[in-house]
Every structure is written in C-alpha cells, then in structure tokens.
Image (tube, rainbow, N blue to C red):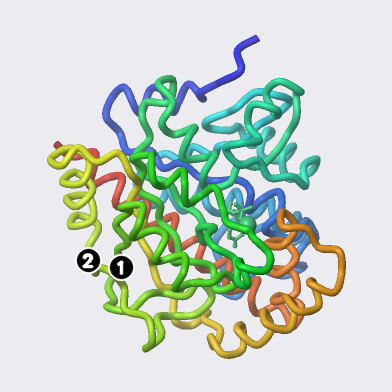
C-alpha cells in the first residue's frame, strides 16, 4: 500500500496548472475544540452546521473558502499511516473524530511506519506540499505559524515550523506569529533563516488574534495577492532561494481581541503551566484553550474568522501564481 496518496482532483488540478492551496490539519486535531458551537460563528460563514463539531466545521469552512475564492483545497493529514494530500469529506470527518494528535516533520515517519492518524502542523504540511507526488503545491493556509515559545531560555520549546520554513519553498499564509509565542524572537529566527516575512496591507506585524500593534514593524509590506505572487517568484525562481515565504494577514477588524488582554492571559497561563505538568508539545493546545476560556469564547470566534480570511487570501495568491 502506498504511504503517500494525492487526491486525484489535486493531481489533475496541478497537472493542468490550476491553483491549489494546501491546508494544515493540526488545527483540526489539536487547535480547535471538538465540541459543537451550538450556534453559527459570529462571522456567519454559509454552510456552517452548528450542531457538528467545531474542528470539523472549521476544516470544511477552510475548504469552502478556498473553493469560493477560485482554487482547489488540499487538506493534508496522516490517516492510518498514509500521508494524504487532499481529503474526501469522509476522511475529514474521520480525522476530526478520531485524532487528538499533531504530527510535525519529525513525527511523520513514525506515523507512516506505525499506521497512525494525525493532523499535520505547518512544517509537516509544507513538507507534504513539496513531495514530488504532490506537484508542487506552492501556497498553504493556516491560522498562525509556530515559533519560539515565551521563556524559551528556561523552557526550550522551538517549533519545527521554523526549520522547515528555512528549507521549503512554500508560501505560508497566516495571521502572523501566534501571540502565545515570543514574537520578536520568532521574527529574529525567521530573519536569520532567510525567510521573507510580508505583512498584508499593513506596515506593522499582525498579532494572530490582534491586529498590528505599534511596537512591531513588519519586515516587509505588500498590498495585493499579485504582488505577493511576484515576490514568491523572485525569491524562488530569480534568486533560487529554497526557503518559504511567510505572509501575515491581519485578523478581520470586527473579530480582533485586544493584544494586552491576550498577553495578560498568556502570561498567567504560562506561569500556571510551569507549576503544573504541561509538556512542550501540549503547550500550544493548552494556551489556546485557556485564552478561549478566559475571553468567554471570543478567541474561538476570532480564530474561525481569521482562518476563513487566510484561506481566501491563500487562494488568491495561488491563483496569481498559477498565471504564467
Ligand atoms: N495556530 C493555531 N492552532 C494550531 C496551530 C497554530 O491557532 O493548532 C498549530 C499549527 O499547525 C502549527 C503548530 O504549525 O501549531 C505548531 O506546533 P509546534 O509548536 O508543536 O511546532
Ligand atoms: Mn511549540
């Protein structure tokens, strides 16, 4: 049995030069709750089933958003030891139901060898997008990339997303660096690794749940998807660079949370985690859960809205890249 399966529609689209957007799936298995919202999210996306698990509906929402913006979605995940690029709805349902695991680059071989089921992080999704079988897929969407965690000197925790970004020519559309991380240090690491970081339509760096704040300038700014596609071509084709490109898209204004609020919650939650038994791998899901609880669910609303917005922008960049 093959260990890598590309959905036939994805293969067909790539062969005929149609735009394809890769979607990470760790957000389905660990990033979002598997409980139902019970009502539509505030951004009221068409087709959201309020009685169905939030993580599954978010996965479906991302796929729809990519399609509606004119590209083909390819959700990446490992199912029963097969790395899949492009899922059927039944496979998406299974992933959301059975897995509470995320696989990054270093976990993939074990997942394949041992028949595991897991959502893929940005790093593992980038790797999948670059496999010869996959095409390549040049653009992927996520909520936020991983990076250097706060207090990394005392509790070392640095995401594989950074090392994969250094060696994989994929454009990652996110809301910037998750505000639960040490953002300046993460930016510094990206700079060191030669990864262009582009803020979309703003001079300042978007902060995941929060819009750009005054303190942090973005390394670069571009205002439309065509310009971003041009930058990607210059980076990969003209200059021959093999690193990724990070696009930071601000969360839609109506759904943003105040950065100071998120910051205070994360600081308190980290102190509580240090006293308890939270391992490095569990830190991201733990912090996301605490931020959501302590904002009365507003963080989840924000997360859903930003995912939708990133999927749309990724589809537009993929479409611009597909035009020769
Ligand atoms: N942002 C979220 N939820 C998530 C993640 C990011 O709002 O679940 C995931 C992404 O898949 C990212 C991963 O690639 O967390 C980073 O995990 P780690 O720090 O373990 O490398
Ligand atoms: Mn981490």
Give the percent coordinates (x, y) of residue 171: 35, 48
Residue under label 1, please give it: 200
Give the percent coordinates (x, y) of residue 10: 43, 28
Q: Is residue 118 left or right of residue 145?
A: right
The residue drawn where x is 41% and y is 31% is: 130
Give the percent coordinates (x, y) of residue 39: 72, 70
Q: Residue furthest top?
A: 1
**Quadrant including the N terminus:** top right
The residue drawn where x is 24% and y is 41% is: 241
- The local crowd at label 1, few if under 14, some if 14 to 19, many if 20 or more residues have their Cα within 10 Å, is many
Answer above or below: position of 14 versus 301: above
Residue under label 2, please give it: 222
Mark 2 vs ligand 1: CB under 8 Å? Answer: no
Answer above or below: position of 314 versus 76: below
Ligand 1, what quadrant? bottom right
Mark 1 vs ligand 1: CB under 8 Å? Answer: no
The residue drawn where x is 61% and y is 17% is: 3
Task: Of the two numbered discs 2 and 1 on the same chain, state the one appearing first in sequence.
Answer: 1
Give the percent coordinates (x, y) of residue 312: 40, 56
Q: CA distance from mark 2 to mark 1?
A: 5 Å
């Amino acid at each position: 049995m093959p260990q890598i399966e590309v959905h036939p529609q994805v293969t067909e689209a790539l062969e005929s030069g149609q735009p394809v957007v890769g979607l990470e799936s760790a957000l389905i298995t660990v990033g979002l709750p598997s409980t139902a919202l019970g009502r539509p999210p505030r951004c009221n996306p068409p087709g959201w089933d309020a009685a169905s698990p939030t993580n599954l509906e978010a996965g479906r929402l991302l796929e729809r958003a990519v399609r509606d913006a004119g590209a083909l979605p390819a959700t990446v995940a490992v199912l029963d030891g097969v790395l899949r690029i492009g899922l059927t709805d039944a496979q998406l349902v299974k992933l959301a139901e059975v897995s509470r695991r995320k696989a990054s680059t270093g976990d993939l071989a074990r997942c394949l060898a041992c028949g595991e089921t897991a959502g893929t992080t940005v790093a593992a999704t980038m790797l999948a997008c670059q496999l010869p079988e996959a095409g390549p897929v040049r653009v992927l969407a996520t909520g936020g990339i991983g990076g250097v965690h706060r207090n990394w000197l005392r509790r070392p925790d640095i995401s594989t997303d950074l090392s994969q970004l250094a060696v994989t020519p994929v454009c990652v559309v996110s809301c910037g660096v998750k505000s639960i991380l040490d953002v300046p240090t993460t930016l510094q690491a990206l700079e060191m690794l030669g990864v262009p970081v582009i803020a979309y339509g703003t001079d300042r760096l978007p902060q995941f749940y929060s819009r750009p704040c005054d303190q942090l300038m973005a390394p670069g700014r571009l205002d439309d998807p065509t310009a971003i596609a041009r930058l990607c071509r210059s980076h990969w084709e003209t200059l021959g660079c093999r690193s990724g490109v990070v696009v930071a898209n601000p969360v839609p204004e109506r759904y943003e949370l105040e950065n100071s609020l998120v910051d205070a919650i994360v600081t308190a939650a980290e102190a509580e985690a240090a006293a308890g038994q939270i391992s490095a791998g569990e830190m991201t899901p733990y912090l996301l859960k605490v931020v959501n609880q302590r904002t009365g669910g507003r963080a989840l609303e924000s997360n859903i809205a930003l995912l939708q917005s990133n999927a749309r922008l990724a589809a537009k960049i993929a479409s611009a890249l597909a035009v020769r």
